Amino acid sequence: MIIEPRMRGFICLTAHPDGAAQSVKNQIAYVKSKGKINGGKKVLVIGASTGFGLASRIVSAFGSDAATIGVFFEKPPMEGKTASPGWYNSAAFENEANAAGLYAKSINGDAFSNEVKQQTIDMIKADLGQVDLVIYSLASPVRTNPNTGVTHRSTLKPIGSTFTNKTVDFHTGKVSEVSIEPANEEDIANTVAVMGGEDWAMWIEAMKSAGVLAPGAMTVAYSYIGPAVTEAVYRKGTIGRAKDHLEATASDITKNLESIGGKAYVSVNKALVTQASSAIPVIPLYISLLYKTMKSAGTHEGTIEQIQRLYADRLYNGSEVPTDEKGRIRIDDWELDDKIQSEVARLWEVATTENLPEIGDLEGYRKDFYHLFGFEIPGVDYQADANEMVAVKSIA
Ligand code: NAD
Ligand code: NA
């Protein structure tokens, strides 16, 4: 069928299999162009189908010839109805990995559940024995704790007082003022339960007890800090509390892994257009100003460039892993560069609906958003009949 983007608010209801496949191919080509990385050879990626997790799977496979297992939660296609983008990305990834002679299997289900953890452990035991790298890259608005049965929903709210600032609707380009009411204690606890480190620690504990972590195994989860203008709604808001918890969990996990010589890291990554970040007020305006500034400075990166640099220059640089004073890996260094930030802060003050197309990269934002769903990828014929019923080969 002919597949077109169908928008509802900040989400796109359709995805394009051929666009997703081309986007995966482009990411693989980038990783190959940067040369080999002496990284992990058996890798589990939790949250492997989109964004930073997909990039991690691609860098492991095509940078280090790794066997990969990918866990994700995606909608398969139905006749006449497209799959979610991560499904098509994963189908394409497996095809490319198999063609390159690399092991690649996937598990589609709720990573927060005990069942999916067990299924993953069984697959590692049967096929790989052990893994030496575990990437934890989940982004979800909801988590059911398997031990309590309680379902937690995260919120994106400031803490303490109402936050008012500028934002942009990137579909219309309209800049307006937005006010967000502060969170209560329950909002904070729920957001920490969903996006904090509890589930990461549960994964690593389950894997360690099952003996599927190799000696010296590493695990890495992703965090964000960002600038002063987004602080109230991000790093000092509910999601920031969850990231504080995630970062603290890294040291707990490292202690737990002492007996096998393992280590847990948090990598602080750059702000990028994803489904999740588009839904956070204020962030799209910040990202459009940031993109413009970093692109003209020549330091702009997407997820694949970020993760290739994480592996090559940080995790597997042949010597110690460089971290900040809190033990965090920083690949948001170019975003938080003083020159970049002072320029973004200057633009922030003057940004209006009228001047944003000039001073911001709204077009780049919009394009990246469409790319998430496999649309507007150069070289793809969107007038051609596309097969929506694409299978992820390893999933029966
Ligand atoms: P994303 O939405 O692109 O990816 C989320 C992944 O999690 C997908 O593979 C999805 O299938 C999977 N997933 C969600 N719920 C699941 C569930 N219940 N069970 C199994 N899989 C599930 O998100 P992303 O932007 O790549 O974010 C990944 C991490 O990076 C998050 O921790 C996020 O906070 C962090 N991060 C994001 C940014 C940014 O700007 N996007 C910046 C820095 C850090
Ligand atoms: Na991800």
Image: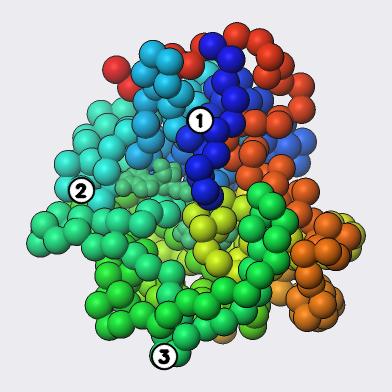
Image-quadrant location for residue 16: top right
Image: 50 above or below 85:
below
Q: Amino acid at mark 2?
A: Ser
Mark 1 touches mark 3? (CB < 8 Å) = no
Camera-nearest residue between 388 and 115: 388
* Image position of 193 (left or right of 350): left
Question: Which one is earlier in the sequence, the residue at label 2 or at label 1?
Answer: 1
Which image quadrant: the C terminus? top left
Question: Which one is earlier in the sequence, the residue at label 1 or at label 3?
Answer: 1
Camera-nearest residue between 194 and 167: 167
Camera-nearest residue between 394 and 367: 367
Residue under the point 28% across and 37% down:
109
Distance Cα–Cα, label 2 vs label 3: 33 Å
- In this view, which residue lies farthest toward the bottom? 160
Q: Looking at the image, can residue 233 be seen? A: yes
The residue pinned by badge 1 equals 14
- In this view, which residue lies farthest toward the left? 148
Q: Looking at the image, can residue 131 be seen? A: no
Image: 87 above or below 148:
above
Label disc, if present, on residue 113 of the rendered structure: 2
The residue pinned by badge 3 equals 160
Question: Which one is earlier in the sequence, the residue at label 2 or at label 3?
Answer: 2
Ligand 1 within 8 Å of disc 3? The answer is no
Q: Amino acid at mark 1?
A: Thr
* Image position of 171 (left or right of 203): right
Mark in front: 2 vs 3 = 3
Image: 150 above or below 90:
below
Instruction: From the top left corner, tell me how far across and down residue 27 is, in percent.
Output: 67, 36
Helix, strand, or loop for circle 2?
loop
Ligand 1 within 8 Å of disc 2? The answer is yes
Q: Amino acid at mark 3?
A: Gly
